[in-house]
Amino acid sequence: MRPASDLTWTDVTPEHLFLNRRSFIAGAAALVAGSAGAAGFSTDEAPNSFDEITNYNNFYEFGFGKTDPARFAKGLTTDPWSVEIDGLVDRPGSYSVADLAPDNAVEERIYRLRCVEAWSMVIPWLGVPLASVLEKVGVQPGAKFVEFETLLRPEEMPAQRRRSMQWPYREGLRLDEAMHPLTILATGLYGQALPNQNGAPIRLVVPWKYGFKSIKSIVRITLTDTQPVSTWQAMQPGEYGFYANVNPRVDHPRWSQATERRIGAGLLGGRQDTLMFNGYGEQVASLYAGMDLARDY
Amino acid sequence: MQLRRLPTGVVWALGALPLAVLVWDVFAGGLGVDPVRDIEHRLGRTAVYFLVASLCVTPLLRLARINLMKFRRPLGLLSASYAALHLLAWAVLDMGLRWEQALKDIARRPYLTIGMAALVILLILAATSSNAAIRRLGARRWGAIHRLVYLAAPLALFHWLLAHKIWPGKPLLILGAVAILLGLRLAWARARRFASNT
Ligand code: HEM
């Protein structure tokens, strides 16, 4: 039923490989390394097709429809790009994507992605652990949280010209969540540079949290001692919490979170049970020991 | 206006068109990455369009002297049919026949409870739409029951609005149109009462 899902990143068209040779080589290196080292991080579930991953996106800066990002993100300038890293760090400053995720450090991570709207995908990301970036800039002892900010550029992000949300989009993690080895800054998928609609040139991926936590097209990373307020949390605090861990037992007022629909499963694919922490409980449950996750949703 | 010379079959044929296009798209692969959602949403939207169209019939007659009265019943029945297909798509394709979760969701999620209320009204109206039903109920009672459509339309639109994370533009516009269409009825009803009081 899903021939496309049998694709691996090596099936990407030659033009793409040619255009993105550098990240392709990095991806190849990562796969070799991955089969030995990072295997514990990647799922062996079949990834969604490149077509599915790049034509079904929530990236509200480009419109609220699932196909708007693919349509309207083409004009986004992602080169040059710099990420401001500030707050409680030893080496604040403006970093390029290559500074943060050099080709030789990029590895492949095949992660499940669970959207708060109760659908899911499997995506072969390329990226670096966020911890490696934070170590590079030197986290100061007082830092407890990491705040992220998306690009604000209404000329290239059409929905930012409307006031439907508070721009720029913001997200945050607790420092231990940010340092967790599963948390990555992604710069590519399927062996090539990240398509614009997926958050080019650099985005966060936190696979045990609902997709909206994985902020796209990042321009600022701030280390702070106070808990950040994320964009959705500020807009609808009753619906979106700071943690937003995937949790089948805590429903969103509008969606049951007990089950999910896997994109690409076909017309009669039905639903599957949603797993606690999106199936990453073994790795991350200890971060939340003693917390009431129904209250801290 | 010669429109009313058209047989009602024309409306049925036109009304089946969105379904035909949908079926075509399912098989021709025109639905994109998540066909389940597309099918469900398109059926829901089509139900709303026919519902709003049925509410336009009387104002068109009174304000523009365009008589489409005989098409009102098929328009309403089309709306009810698309709404029923929308529910079917949800239960079978979206919920994957997980009845327990489906029933709980209808009870717990306000937008689904509201959608269910709208659907129940549409189905009651459909079930009592025949000439025989009008005779059986008597014109007065039948009219009272069928005024429930004034409730069904805003319910369907609130359902649409609440299904989204952000206020979407299109249903807000349609809700505005429905407010005007219902406002006209109110104004006429008051004028009638005023006329009969004097
Ligand atoms: C038991 C009854 C109903 C159920 C269970 C139901 C279920 C749903 C669901 C699950 C969605 C999608 C929400 C999402 O994507 O997050 C939806 C959307 C929608 N429904 Fe219903 N619905 C019901 C009744 C109705 C009725 C009676 C109408 C119209 C007369 C209607 C019109 C719509 C429309 C227009 C949308 C939005 C489509 C879009 O966003 O393009 N629904 N409904």
Image (spheres, helix red, strand yellow):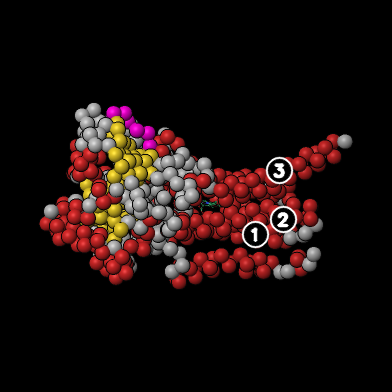
Q: Amino acid at mark 3?
A: Gly
Say which mark, if any, is on residue B183.
Answer: 3
- Helix, strand or loop at mark 1: helix
Magenta stretch holds residue A6: no
Q: Amino acid at mark 1?
A: Leu
- Helix, strand or loop at mark 2: helix
Q: Amino acid at mark 2?
A: Val
- Residue in view at x 57 percent, y 56 percent: B47
- Helix, strand or loop at mark 3: helix
Label 2 chain ID:
B
> Could you tell me how far apart the alpha carbons at marks 3 and 1 are, in whole angstroms?
21 Å
Could you tell me residue A47's position as x and y percent? Answer: 28, 60
Label 1 chain ID:
B
Could you tell me residue A229's position as x and y percent? Answer: 37, 33
Residue tagged 2: B57
The secondary structure that dominates the magenta segment is: loop
Q: Nearer the viewer, residue B63 or B189?
A: B63
Neighbour tally class for label 1: few under 14, some 14-19, many 20 plus, Cα within 10 Å: many
Question: What range of the chain is rendered magenta?
Answer: A225-230
> Could you tell me how far apart the alpha carbons at marks 3 and 2 are, in whole angstroms?
14 Å
The number of discs equals 3
Callouts 2 and 1 on one subunit: yes
Looking at the rendered image, the disc whose residue lies closer to the viewer, 3 or 1, is: 3
- Residue in view at x 43 percent, y 44 percent: A152
Lower sequence index among marks 3 and 1: 1
Say which mark, if any, is on residue B75.
Answer: 1
Q: Nearer the viewer, residue B103 or A202?
A: A202
